[in-house]
Image: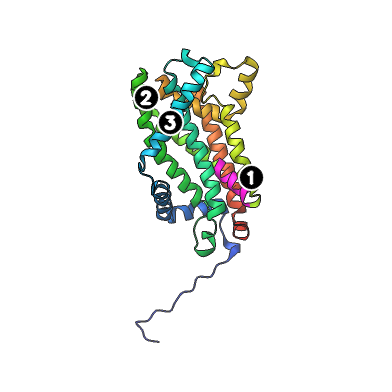
Amino acid sequence: MLKSQKPKIEKIYDSAQRRNPALDELYEVFNYRYLILQLTRRDVLTRYKRSALGVAWTMLNPLGMMIVLSLAFSHVFRFETVYGYPAFVLSGLIAWNFFSQTTTAAMVNLVWGGGLLHRIYMPRTSFALAAIATGLINVTLSLVPLILVMLVTGVPVRATLLFIPIPILLLAMFALGMGLTISTVAVFYPDVAEMYAIAIVGWMYITPVIYPMEILPESYRFWISNLNPMYYFINLFRAPLYYGRIPSMEEILPAVIFALAALVIGWLFFTHRSDEFAYRV
C-alpha cells in the first residue's frame, strides 16, 4: 500500500449502541435542519402554486371566514353587543386555524407522504416540524388582516402586540405534540385521519372561538375552562391583540403546562414507535 493512501474506515451500525430514540431524533433534526427548511418551502410553494392570488390567500382565508361568521352569528345570537366582534372572531380564528391546519398537515403528510421514508433517510419528525414551520409563516401573515380589521372596527392596536410571539410559541409546541401523537396513531389506524377531521370541527365549537365565554351557562363554563386546553391558548392569543393587555401568570401557566406536556408526550410516543413506520406507510 502506498504511504499516501489511507485505509478506509467502515462505519458499522450497532443497534445496541443506539442512543435514546427521543434524544437521537433531536440530534438528527439538527443535522437535517436544511431538509426541514426545504420541506417547508415546498409546502408553501405547492399550496399557492396555481393560485392567482398566491400567498395572499393566507390573509384572505381567515378574513373571509370572519366576514361570514360575523354576519351570521352577530345577528342570530345577538353578538353585536361584543365590542369589535369581527376582531374578536378573527383573533380566535387565526389561533384555531393554526392549530387545526398544522396538526392535520402533520398527520396527512406522514400517512400519505411517508413513502419518502423508503427512498431516503430523514428524521421521521420532519413532516410534523415542516407543518409547524409552514403554520408559523401563515399565522404571521394572518396578523396583517387582523390589524386592519381592528383599525376598521375601532379596536385599539396597542404595544402589547409585541407579546404575541409567546402565545404563538406555546401554541406551536402544543400543536407539534398533538400532531406527533395523532400522526403515530394514524399510521397504524388510517381511519383516524377521517375521524380527526370530524373531531376538530366539534372541538372548535366547544371552544370560545366565535362566541364569548360569558354566554355559556355556569355549569358548562367549568368543564370548558378546565378540561379544554385550547381554551387557554385562545385566551392567551387574544389577550395582547384584542384585549390589549399582557396575560397574567394564572393565564400563562396552564398554557405552558399543556404545551410542555403535549410536546414531551407526543415526542416520546412518536420516536419510540417510529421504527415501525416503514412497515406501515
Above or below, comparing residue 195 to residue 76 in the picture: below
Q: Residues within 10 Å of mark 3 (few under 14, many from 20)?
A: few
Residue 221 visible to the viewer: yes
Query: What distance separates the C-alpha of mark 1 from that of mark 2?
Result: 37 Å
Query: What distance separates the C-alpha of mark 3 from that of mark 2?
Result: 12 Å
Report which residue position mark 2 lands on. 149
Residue positioned 58% across, 36% down in the render:
200
- What x and y, as percent, mark residue 110? 54, 52
- What x and y, as percent, mark residue 256? 51, 32
Q: Give the range drawn in magenta.
A: 178-187
Above or below, comparing residue 243 to residue 173 in the picture: above
Q: Does the magenta stretch include residue 181?
A: yes
Residue 252 visible to the viewer: no
Q: Which of marks 3 and 2 is nearer the N terminus?
A: 3
**Viewer-proximal residue among 184 and 79:** 79
SS at mark 3? helix
In which quadrant is the C terminus drawn?
Answer: bottom right
| Residue extending furthest toward the bottom | 1
Q: Which mark is residue 192?
A: 1
- What x and y, as percent, mark residue 182? 60, 44
Report which residue position mark 3 lands on. 64
